[in-house]
Amino acid sequence: MAEDELLQTAAAVRRGVTRLSRRLRLERPGPSERGEPLLRLSVLAHLSRRGPLTPGELAAAERVRPQSLTRTLASLEGEALITRQSHPADGRRSLMAVTEAGRLVLSRDLRQRDAWLALAMAGHLTPTERELLLLAGQLLERLAEVDDITAPLAPHGPAMTYQAGMSLR
């Protein structure tokens, strides 16, 4: 894929992800239905997906400083949505783990958005398009985990890196 095509593809994916994200935020439960703040949900989701993590690992996953999570972790722990336990390899550190109550809060918040998206997909996409979206979702998750912005353009091709001005070289 040529550089221009790659940039056009990246822009199309970014626009689609951004618009869908905004639309899904509109489907979140309202404050009267106990809609959770997004950072709390994100922490619960990381712990649910990855298992127990240190506060530092959670901060890295959220791309924030550990101090930025202090209140959120204390709040989640105070409501018994997460637990804190000693790290088995280093007693000076702690591991945070999601509780069943935390999983319930997470699933309750996600249920409404997932239901809207499932109905939209069923009503507006073909079975083949839905299969493509499943694959695209998996690929987007992989991309979200990329930390190294230098990657090969092709298996044996030149490397490309992000440079100011959106130039790929």
Image (tube, rainbow, N blue to C red):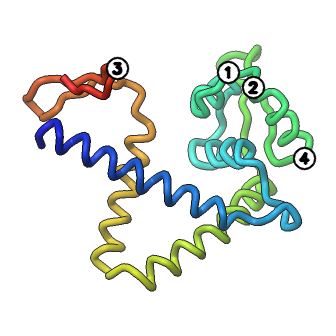
- Asked which secondary structure carries label 3, the reply is loop
Label pair 4/3, CB-CB below 8 angstroms: no
The image quadrant where one finds the N terminus is top left
Nearest to N terminus: mark 1 or mark 4 = 1
Image: 21 above or below 44: below
Q: Which residue is mark 2?
A: 68
Task: Kindly identify the residue that appears in the image at 87 percent across and 39 percent down.
Answer: 75
Q: Is residue 96 left or right of residue 20?
A: right
Task: Kindly identify the residue that appears in the image at 71 percent across and 49 percent down.
Answer: 41
Q: Amino acid at mark 2?
A: Ser
Instruction: In this rendered view, identify the residue nearer to me: 83 or 34.
Output: 34
Local packing at callout 2 (Cα closer than 10 Å; few below 14, some 14-19, many 20+) is few
Label pair 1/3, CB-CB below 8 angstroms: no
Between marks 2 and 4, how big is the CA–CA gap? 19 Å
Between marks 1 and 2, how big is the CA–CA gap? 5 Å
Image: 39 above or below 91: below
Looking at the image, which residue sits at the far left? 156
- Asked which secondary structure carries label 2, the reply is helix
Label pair 1/2, CB-CB below 8 angstroms: yes
Nearest to N terminus: mark 2 or mark 4 = 2
* Nearer mark to the viewer, of 1 and 3: 3
Label pair 1/4, CB-CB below 8 angstroms: no
Q: Amino acid at mark 3?
A: Ala
* Nearer mark to the viewer, of 2 and 4: 2
Q: Which residue is mark 1?
A: 65
The quarter holding residue 4 reads: top left
Residue 167, horizontal then vertical, whole percent: 25, 26
Residue 157, horizontal then vertical, whole percent: 8, 28
Q: Which residue is mark 3?
A: 164
Local packing at callout 4 (Cα closer than 10 Å; few below 14, some 14-19, many 20+) is few
Task: Kindly identify the residue that appears in the image at 41 percent across and 56 percent down.
Answer: 16
Q: Which mark is residue 79?
A: 4
